[in-house]
Amino acid sequence: MLLERPPTLPCLLLCAGLACSCGASDDSNETVADAAPDLAVAQPEVGLDLGPVPAPDGAPDLSPTGGDGAAAPSCSGLSLPAKRDYTLTLQHGGLQRRALVHIPPSYDPDEATPLVFNNHGSMCTAELQAQMSHLDAYADKHGVITVTPQGTAMIPGWNVGKSPQDYLYAQVDDVDFFRTLIAELEKTLCIDPRRTFCTGFSLGGSMCYRLSCDMSDRIAAIASVSGPDGTVTCNPKRAVPLLHIHGTADSWASYAPDATGYNKGAEAYVAAHAKRSGCAPQTTVTLTQGKVTCKSYSCPATTEVTLCTVTDGGHTWPGGDGWLLGGTVNKDINASEMILEFFDRHPM
């Protein structure tokens, strides 16, 4: 079912430490182009190439049928959506689920188009995740469809495997929800199966880790912003490229290991992902810009694992909007632009 987007919802339980942006409501019928932020991104001081180490021979083939991934769908009979922004609703697991869908101006129903999931953090909403990250505006520049789904429970979130709130979501099969959501989207949109990606903030980024383990056949690459890896077991069918961005002053999902046992620290879970991706343990600095330092593992040419450490950065989306209890928002990089450029390099 397709619905016009509702107005942005207020934050839930702000005083309890909501892990997302809590800005004012906006007009959901306004196109992103009308309110797009400045898309200019400062040039890095050193390390212009964030590619894998060693770098692959030449740029990846991003054509719909290029590379070693699945062939693009025929997409015959599809037409342009009536709206560029709408809410998709569906029944799944006895629950009514929904997701915000944003179509770029360049979308052609006859051409396979990349898709990026943009997952919200715990206790937040899809509307606020879209607003905080400004991902839709940057996706327009890259010709990418964005889908911002809504989690479940009174404290909205995701079944990532292991988290402080995992008892709230343990009965929800979110992995199958994403599979079902892709299948539903493919009924009306021409989606490239080689270029379906996942990014998210906080627990939403943790859900991307879960999908890299359980849906490596459909998720080409992932990017997490301040979202720890909460997977209990991980046996992907293929190595899934990872970009992880995390602030050292994050007080909600700490950069260093915490005493709860849920968070082993950004360096540890990125290293674990690199190991199961076939990468060597050595890292090389691939970008320094202001307070941001990115280190990439020495991986096979077909994958990339990079950790970008934001010194003094809070539980926030770099380059995006802040929220009351999130701490410092770093402006040396723009996470949305960096993530989309990372995905550009990593079709399946």
Image (spheres, rainbow, N blue to C red):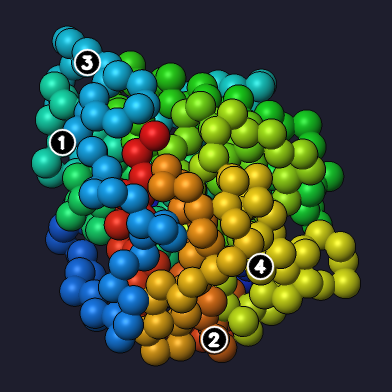
Q: Marks 2 and 4: in contact by CB < 8 Å?
A: no
Image quadrant assignment for residue 210:
top right
Number of numbered tags placed on the structure image = 4
Point out residue 116 in the picture as x, y percentages from the top left corner. 38, 43
Residue type, mark 3 in image: Cys
Q: Position of residue 242 (x, y in %)?
A: 51, 53
Say which of marks 2 and 1 sits in front.
2
Residue drawn at (51%, 22%) of the image: 180
Residue at the spot 27% in from the left edge and 43% down from the top edge:
60
Q: Residue at x 23, y 38 (%)?
A: 61
Q: Cβ–Cβ below 8 Å for labels 2 and 1?
A: no
What residue would you read off at disc 3? 75
Residue topped by disc 2: 311
Asked if residue 302 shows in the view, the reply is yes
- The residue carrying mark 4 is 266
Give percent across and percent down for residue 320. Answer: 39, 72
**Secondary element at image label 2:** loop
Secondary structure at numbered mark 1 = loop
